[in-house]
Image (tube, helix red, strand yellow):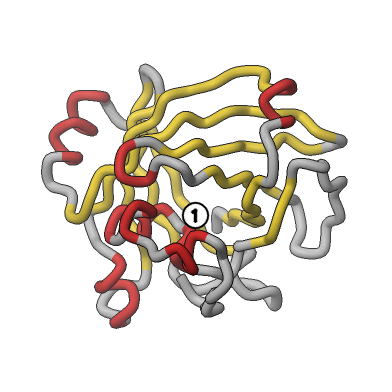
Amino acid sequence: MALEIERKFLIVNDRWREAVSRTVAMAQGYINDQAAMDSGAQRASVRIRLEGDDARLNIKSRESVSAKPGCSRQEFDYPIPVGDANDLLALCVGGRIEKRRHFVEYGRHAWEIDEFLGENAGLIIAEVELAADDETFETPEWLGMEVTEYARYYNLALASRPYSHWSEAERAATDLECTTCL
């Protein structure tokens, strides 16, 4: 079983930009939507992603597979031809996610910082992948509140309800409603 152990955080300043080693433009869409996941009609998200000159099909389980909610999920990721990805993106529901992914090394970990564009412009999320749920990591000074367990920060949710549609309270992260399943 393929497993992704990932933690997500908001960003509090732009200091991370000084350490970017590379940046990749991404566009992605989903074959299913947040409503299908919320209702339990589907137990996995199905994503198509264009990443620079590459394309991938990704399937990620809804439920956490660890004791720590939202942190570890099954993930299956496969390269596909770019032409197929473009055809599949035309079949996607919800909005298309466009972002720039910046890669930053900090301590012993590689951080991926997603700077969203389009309807999600203004949102920046840092992610770190870990080898174990309880793995410790150094926290950079640009790292803010952890949002791993908050479904609205996941790309599938952002495709259905973009950041530009959030209230000021939601943008300020003052009314977070935790979900343990995504």
Residue at 27% x, 51% y: name it.
30
Q: Give the x, y percent position of residue 163.
A: 38, 54
Q: Nearer the viewer, residue 165 or 114?
A: 165
Circle 1 residues within 10 Å: few <14, some 14–19, many ≥20: some
Give the residue type that dot 1 points to. Answer: Glu
Q: Is residue 126 left or right of residue 82?
A: right
Quarter location, residue 104: top right
Please, is residue 8 above or below residue 119 in the view?
Answer: below
Instruction: Indicate the position of residue 128 as horizontal and vertical percent values.
Output: 68, 46
Residue 105 in the image, given as x and y percentages of width and height: 76, 29
Q: Is residue 175 left or right of residue 167?
A: right
Whole-percent x, y for residue 148 in the image: 61, 63
Residue at horizontal 69 percent and vertical 74 percent from the top: 68
Please say whether residue 6 is visible from this viewpoint: no
Residue occupying the far front of the picture: 168
Q: Residue furthest bottom?
A: 39
Q: Secondary structure at mark 1?
A: strand
Quarter of the N terminus within the rendering: bottom right
Residue underneath mark 1? 75
The answer to whether 30 appears left or right of 149 in the picture is left
Q: Report the number of discs.
A: 1
Residue 74 lies, with reference to residue 13, above or below; the image says below
Residue 26 seen in the current view: yes
Task: Pick whichever, 167 or 103, lies toward us.
Answer: 167
The residue at the point 25 percent across, 72 percent down is 36
User: What residue is shown at x 58% (from left), y 28% (from top)?
Assistant: 102
